Image: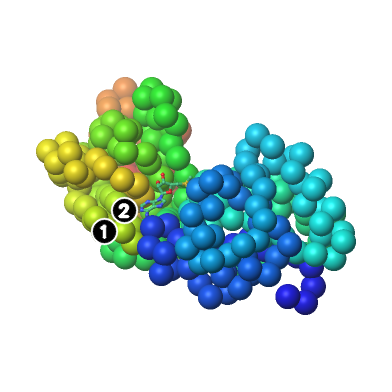
Amino acid sequence: MSESALYVVATPIGNLDDMTPRAIRTLESVALIAAEDTRHSGRLLSHFNIKTQMIAVHDHNERQQQQKIIAILEKGESVALISDAGTPLISDPGFVLVREVRAAGHRVVPVPGCCAMVAALSAAGIPSDRFAFEGFPPAKSQQRLNYYSALAGETRTLMFYESPHRIEDSLSAVVDAFGADRPIVLARELTKTFETYLSGTAAEVLLQVQSDPNQRKGEFVMMVQGAPAKDDSALDQQASDTLDILLEELSVKQASALAAKITGIKKKVLYQAALERK
Ligand code: SAM
């Protein structure tokens, strides 16, 4: 390794064969490995016979440990950052460390590899051209429902991480917020023995998870297909009904202006539709 750097190293999300040769070489050659949980990562390192010293860097001590890490970089040596699984910083600690190491003028180099979100999307058969990764939804049920409801109009594919003890309630909230017919895909235990993809409407996937306890075990990536893009030239049923009701009491101009405020559809489109109804 020529120049000193902080290497951000992705590790497997289940199958150890997904560890890249470059990740192994990097972890072997740095002066120190900053790990989210040293006991957990100890098993990975011993599997690959990597003897490099580790320190714990997690959400609660990131700021203190960054001084130690920057001091090592200042001596011209390198450090690697790993998390328990997958890519550090993706729903994992490391953001503050990376930002501060960069701010201190040192190189930060990604060593890419597994990421559950990317793996899930790559094989889900759900639109992948535009997507939004939301990480873990809130744990409390009312907050989660509000949070999903606020996302119901999003047209990009939405991606969430979810834990086994919340998956059933979370899917129920998806049905309530996005509608029973919204297409979703649930990826479970990626790269592991019980890897499963469940797909269908939100209500269908919820039913499968409710009726089979095995489908509630393990690690999950939940993908919700985006809402259909609003076509300004044609009114959907709700906008059409809104306009009809307003036209019973108001002029074309007033009704279309008010309907635009309620539906978010352009006033010009609603005005034209209102004229056609008169
Ligand atoms: N940094 C990781 C990454 O790059 O994907 C994610 C860390 S986050 C703390 C852990 C969550 O990722 C799990 O609760 C689950 O939602 C998802 N996850 C991790 N491994 C997975 C797997 N093998 N199959 C499905 N989801 C997984």
Check the image and tell me how it is coloured.
rainbow
Label 2 CB less than 8 angstroms from ligand 1: yes
Name which residue lies at 43% across and 68% down: 18
| Image quadrant in which you'd find residue 196 | bottom left
Name which residue lies at 67% across and 48% down: 55
The reply to whether discs 2 and 1 touch (Cβ–Cβ < 8 Å) is yes
Q: Report the side of 146 relative to 52 (left or right).
A: left
Name which residue lies at 81% across and 46% down: 67
Label 1: which secondary element: loop
Say if 109 sits above or below 239 in the image: below
Camera-near label (2 vs 1) is 1
Q: What residue type is labelled 2?
A: Glu
Say if 251 sits above or below 233 in the image: above
Name which residue lies at 57% across and 69% down: 23
Residue for badge 2:
189
Q: Can residue 20 be seen in this view?
A: yes
Where in the figure is residue 221, as x and y percent of width and height?
Answer: 36, 49
Where in the figure is residue 213, as x and y percent of width and height?
Answer: 17, 39
Say if 216 sits above or below 8 in the image: above
Residue that extends furthest to the right in the rendered view of this protein: 75
Residue for badge 1:
193
Q: How far apart are marks 2 and 1 (CA)?
A: 7 Å
Label 2: which secondary element: loop
Residue that extends furthest to the left in the rendered view of this protein: 211
